Amino acid sequence: MQWRRGLWTLGLGVCSLGAAGCSGGDDKSKCAEPTIDGSPFSLTGTATVHGTGTLPAGSPDGYELDLMIGDQDAQYGVLPPNLLDASYVCGQTFGYTIHQVPAGTYQLFYALYANNAMEPSAMGPSTQSFTVADGQDLEFDATF
């Protein structure tokens, strides 16, 4: 995670997430589809949401990928257990699992950051929302 950008997103109430993927400097033959596994910053619940995310066409490999959960008013960054992990785009799809989600209706949001950038180069919400109940394990495939 880029700390200055992380502090900027934290100030907006949106935090970074991460998982192993391809780093910004790796060649494309060595990158792998990222898998994001974490919990929403400052939320506690008993549901789990998992699935596949599909980024917009043309999302560049090697860009850092952040995933958030929320609604149009507030988004919460999905944080991995190791805050230093980062996730990088490698192709148009990524897998994700979000633990400790409170019951409610949400959308997923993504942000892409070029190397060392503090502001996202692309961001947006999923095209559909989902509703999850306490204790539920929900599969939701998100298209952005």
Image: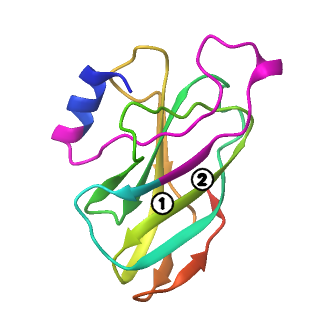
Determine the residue located farthest toward the right in the rendered image.
29
Relative image position of residue 117 (x, y in whole percent): 39, 17
Q: Secondary structure at mark 1?
A: strand
Kind of residue at badge 2: Phe
Residue occupying the point 53% across, 71% down: 49
* Residue 29, placed above or below residue 59: above
Which mark lies nearer to you, 1 or 2? 1
User: Where is residue 32, by image quadrant?
Assistant: top right
Left or right for 114, reference 23: left
* In the foreground, 86 or 125: 86
The reply to whether the C-beta atoms of the residues labelled 1 and 2 are less than 8 Å apart is yes
Left or right for 63, reference 11: right
* In the foreground, 59 or 80: 80
Which residues fall within the magenta stretch?
Answer: 10-37
User: Where is residue 47, by image quadrant?
Assistant: bottom left
Q: Which quadrant holds the N terminus? A: top left
Q: Is most of the magenta stretch helix, strand or loop?
A: loop
Relative image position of residue 66 (x, y in whole percent): 46, 41
Q: Which mark is residue 144?
A: 2
The way the protein has been coloured in the rendering is rainbow
Residue occupying the point 49% across, 73% down: 48
